[in-house]
Amino acid sequence: MVEHWLKCNESKTELLILGKSSAIDKLTFEPSVRFGDVDIGPIDFKGTSGKTLGIYMDENLTLERQVNSVRKHCGMLLKNLWQVNRCLDFSTKVLLVKQLVISRLDYCNILYGGLPKKLIARLQKVLNSCVRFIYGLHGHQDDYLPYLRETHILPIEQRVVFKSCLMAYKIIHGSAPDYLCEQIPAENVLDVPRRTRATTVPDLFKLWYPKLSSVNASSKLRKRRPSVLLPDLWNALPLDLRSLTTVESFKTRLKTRLFVESFGAD
């Protein structure tokens, strides 16, 4: 921090204790950190505490606080938009929804990868509410996919995949920040065994997949780690997609692929 001319603000510094509920319950002492002249104790994860870069953390890293916060914020935005619904045409509604509401759903949505279905469903309900606003629908609809397809809006799960694969593309092609390239490196060509006539050409567009112990291999939290999630999603893409030379062509091809997976080829 000194090298970058930065200084911590004691009044804004928080101590977060994160882990499984069973492990946290076993703590036999009250942890604290001496910071300057101030003793900082663990926060309660209530209100605005535990918020970093707009993301609400919780002690078990379930992201339930974050999902509920996004739902509440998007609900307020849609409530205000409904007030002027009759004054807007179809294209303007789509534009406002994408810029005001869906942008909020997409913010840091890589963190939503691997979340339980019930939390993803809460975010999908926000997207369904957007559809009802755009088309002026009242009440629950049996199927929202035709409306999402017409407005070219991907469902929540596919949006997470899109953002994750886009980040992986930037890591592979060297346009991502250095800290991401260090945490989620590409497979080193030097690590690939020397080719023989029986071996295939090595894939130079893969992310390195971390190998952990068998105890952690089945952990749901482990599968949510970007260092595991991104290689899982990226390496599953076909080579011709991963090897595209421009980010715009990659985004177009990837969205088309996810669009077909979500709504069909017709």
Image (cartoon, rainbow, N blue to C red):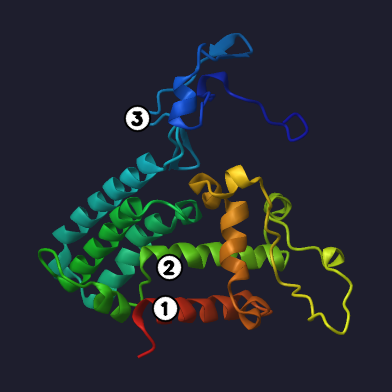
Q: Amino acid at mark 3?
A: Gly
Give the mark toward the camera: 1 or 3: 1
Q: Residue at x 36, y 42 (%)?
A: 64
Question: Where does label 3 land, which residue?
Answer: 47
Which x, y percent locates residue 53? 50, 42
Label total for image: 3
Other residues around mark 3 within 10 Å, as few (<14) / some (14–19) / many (≥20): few
Q: Is residue 108 left or right of residue 171?
A: left
Q: Are marks 2 and 3 in contact (CB under 8 Å)?
A: no
Residues at marks 1 and 2, CA–CA distance in whole angstroms:
9 Å
Question: Where does label 1 land, which residue?
Answer: 261
Q: Is residue 197 left or right of residue 73?
A: right
Other residues around mark 1 within 10 Å, as few (<14) / some (14–19) / many (≥20): few
Q: Amino acid at mark 1?
A: Glu
Q: Residue at x 42, y 29 (%)?
A: 49
Q: Residue 138 appears in which quarter of the rendering?
A: bottom left
Q: Is residue 93 left or right of residue 206?
A: left
Other residues around mark 2 within 10 Å, as few (<14) / some (14–19) / many (≥20): some
**Secondary structure of the residue carrying numbered label 2:** helix
Q: Amino acid at mark 2?
A: Gln
Q: Are marks 1 and 2 in contact (CB under 8 Å)?
A: yes
